[in-house]
């Protein structure tokens, strides 16, 4: 593992933090003072540099812009009751980043170095971690092909960057989702399990069309038959069916979310019954119509949990019971939030205090 002393620090002379109201934060458009940047070239990673967050120069022929070698991660750091800051399961994101890199034929990162860089960056911009009960520091590591070259092949050069955004609550409100039976997010053998930039671009048009039809988000189904539920927008989904927490299994077409895994493991720990399996659209529809489906929600780092108030099946929309009557989602949301904010038990050692 590379020691942090091997990083170069080119820190800002004056912080911008006095110009920011940390009590009122839009999501994802306020950026902390610093970023971490490291270049891959000549077959190896160069020295990592902490420098000011800011615009960068790039060749118009940078391969990532043309052929899509671009991946990202999303994670959060939370202020703890004693004033310290903790990351939540960072190694999960780091490992997933390398899985995405592998699928996109990009350079892999040393996991220890990645973690050190994250920790140093949070330390450097420690004062940017908001302490509001619904605020946190959103962390965006990403990498793209930077070699100037026209022609499809893996790039020989990459740029790896981590920047952070202090964020407030990400209220999407309750959402109406459309079961998508034409467009596909991910196919077997494809790239659905990777956080690859192109996956998100491809979801925009179907989502815009669903919006035009009065829905907020898509409930993706399998690419082969459109018969099984996969995930919702950029969140995994969890259903409460006959009192059990049921979530579609993850695999190469369903991204393995850290939030999903955390919610399910905490639920099992608390004694709830959980099932990770295929969830048929027909089963969900029957459950929604009979009342067996009592709760449905999206789970992901940005919003944590998003209640689904209605599901648009082909030909019929079915409303769920009013969100105010739900029991499991609020309980699990509080358990997870307390854990991340250092106010609750951490039975699995998920908090990494820095
Ligand atoms: C990021 C992401 C999720 C959620 O993953 P978390 O690790 O919980 O943030 C789910 N689905 C897709 C497609 C995603 O990109």
Image (spheres, rainbow, N blue to C red):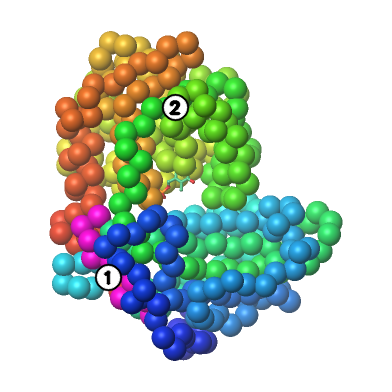
Q: Is residue 226 above or below residue 220?
A: above
Q: Mark 1 to mark 2: distance in Å?
A: 37 Å
Label 2 SS = loop
Residue interval drawn in magenta:
124-134
Residue 151 x/y as whole percent: 84, 56
Residue 126 part of the magenta segment:
yes
Label 1 CB sits under 8 Å from any ligand 1 atom: no
Front residue of this view, candidates 187 and 17: 17
Does residue 309 appear to the left or right of 96 in the view shown?
A: left
Q: How many other residues sit within 10 Å of disc 2, few (<14), some (14-19) or many (≥20)?
A: some
Q: Which residue is mark 2?
A: 215
Query: What's the mark number on residue 226?
Result: none
Q: How many other residues sit within 10 Å of disc 1, few (<14), some (14-19) or many (≥20)?
A: many
Which sits earlier in the primary sequence, circle 1 or circle 2?
A: 1
Residue 204 x/y as whole percent: 57, 38
Q: Quadrant of the C terminus?
A: bottom left
Q: Which residue is mark 1?
A: 85
In front: label 1 or label 2 = 2
The overriding secondary structure of the stretch rendered in magenta is: loop
Q: Is residue 65 above or below residue 163?
A: above
Front residue of this view, candidates 311 and 261: 311
């Amino acid at each position: 593992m590379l020691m942090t002393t091997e990083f170069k620090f080119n820190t800002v002379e004056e912080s911008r933090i006095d110009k920011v109201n940390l009590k009122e934060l839009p999501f994802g458009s306020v950026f902390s003072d610093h970023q971490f940047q490291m270049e891959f070239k000549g077959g190896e990673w160069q020295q990592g540099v902490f420098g000011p967050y800011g615009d960068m120069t790039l060749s118009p022929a940078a391969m990532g812009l043309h052929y899509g070698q671009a991946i990202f991660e999303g994670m959060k750091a939370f202020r703890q009751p004693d004033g310290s800051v903790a990351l939540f399961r960072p190694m999960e994101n780091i490992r997933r980043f390398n899985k995405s890199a592998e699928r996109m034929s990009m350079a892999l990162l040393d996991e220890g170095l990645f973690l050190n860089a994250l920790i140093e960056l949070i330390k450097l911009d420690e004062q940017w971690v908001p302490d509001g009960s619904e605020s946190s520091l959103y962390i965006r590591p990403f990498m793209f092909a930077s070699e100037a070259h026209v022609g499809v092949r893996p790039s020989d050069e990459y740029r790896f960057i981590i920047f952070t955004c202090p964020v407030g609550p990400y209220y999407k409100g309750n959402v109406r989702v459309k079961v998508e039976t034409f467009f596909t997010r991910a196919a077997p053998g494809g790239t659905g399990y990777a956080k690859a930039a192109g996956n998100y671009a491809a979801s925009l048009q179907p989502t815009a069309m669903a919006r035009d039809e009065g829905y907020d988000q898509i409930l993706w189904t399998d690419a082969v038959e459109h018969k099984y539920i996969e995930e919702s927008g950029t969140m995994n989904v969890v259903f409460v069916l006959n009192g059990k927490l049921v979530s579609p299994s993850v695999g190469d077409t369903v991204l393995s979310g850290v939030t999903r895994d955390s919610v399910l493991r905490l639920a099992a720990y608390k004694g709830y019954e959980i099932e990770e399996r295929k969830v048929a659209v027909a089963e969900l529809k029957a459950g929604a119509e009979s009342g067996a489906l009592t709760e449905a929600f999206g789970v992901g780092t940005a919003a944590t949990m998003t209640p689904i108030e209605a599901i648009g099946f082909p030909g019929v929309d079915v409303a769920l019971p009013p969100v105010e009557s739900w029991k499991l989602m609020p309980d699990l949301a509080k358990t997870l939030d307390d854990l991340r904010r250092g106010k609750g038990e951490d039975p699995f050692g998920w908090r990494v205090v820095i």
